[in-house]
Amino acid sequence: MKDRYSKKKSAHLEQHARTERMVAALAHEIKNPLNSMKGASQYLHDKYNGQNEISEFTGIIIDEINRLERYLNEFLSFSSGMSLKLGKVRLENFITAILMIVKHSFPSDIRATIKKTPMPEVYIDQEQMRQVLVNFFSNSGDALRMVKNPKAEVILDADKKNAYITLRDNGTGINAKDIKHIFEPFFTTKDTGLGIGLAISNTIVKKHGGRITVKSVPHVSTEFTISVPLEKRRNKR
Ligand SMILES: Nc1ncnc2c1ncn2[C@@H]1O[C@H](COP(=O)(O)OP(=O)(O)O)[C@@H](O)[C@H]1O
Ligand SMILES: [Mg+2]
């Protein structure tokens, strides 16, 4: 029984990986023609600069191409190969390295709390998991820039089954109506948001066998927690 189940499951994962590779390839393929279209529109726009409707309409085309490019770039920043390249990681070091980079553009200090020392080692795809965390930090940063006394904290913890990475902030928070939708592709509450960060992050964490949970009391505390299973990955080796 179990065998048949895991066979079915691995066929499903394979299919999933194939689809992801195809989507990533497609995104790359879309970039080149978009670039040519942008170049041609830009040429006309400059030539007829401000003179007539050619200039007006090419302006619209260029704006829309820019928007598509932002979607593609954000999407591709997550899809570094798509299939997981698992490696053994000490989460303390992993988080420290990420903090070194994000702290420069972050609107507050970021406290780091390690609840269990040493943390157990985990098997993760560092590149992809880093993108997930960078997106969390970027979201927290956006939420903190709107409040008076911004604070953020990263908490590492573990129990027998999982390691947990939590990012807590006291930013604007997420209301009950929105929180059901934040993992949906293209859901955003920001004027220039794309709404694909959490959707892709969720997929990446799920591929690791983990999950993302979220709790928010607007303006008081918003917490995103990633869990990463310990045993499962070890058994696989
Ligand atoms: N730390 C946070 N504080 C408040 N809202 C958040 C936070 N993280 C995510 N969100 C909400 O989730 C939505 C979706 O996030 P995301 O998928 O990263 O897309 P984007 O950042 O482009 O809007 C955001 O628009 C925001 O409403
Ligand atoms: Mg985001």
Image (cartoon, rainbow, N blue to C red):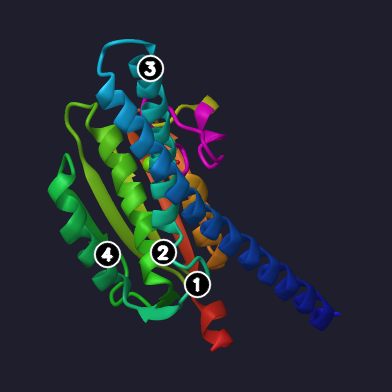
Question: Marks 3 and 2, Cα distance to the nearest angstrom?
Answer: 43 Å
Q: Residues within 10 Å of mark 3 (few under 14, many from 20)?
A: some
Question: Marks 4 and 1, Cα distance to the nearest angstrom?
Answer: 19 Å
What's drawn in magenta, residue-wise? 178-196
Amino acid type shown at disc 4: Ile
Earlier residue among tags 1 and 3? 3
Q: Residue beneath label 4, please?
A: 95
Amino acid type shown at disc 3: Ile
Q: Position of residue 209 (x, y in %)?
A: 56, 67
Q: Position of residue 47 (x, y in %)?
A: 26, 24
Question: Marks 4 and 3, Cα distance to the nearest angstrom?
Answer: 50 Å
Query: Taking 33 as reference, is 88 above or below it?
Result: below
Secondary structure, magenta segment, majority class: loop
Amino acid type shown at disc 2: Gln
The disc at residue 128 is 2
Q: Residue beneath label 1, please?
A: 84
The disc at residue 142 is none
Q: Please tell me which residue lies in front, 34 or 224.
A: 34
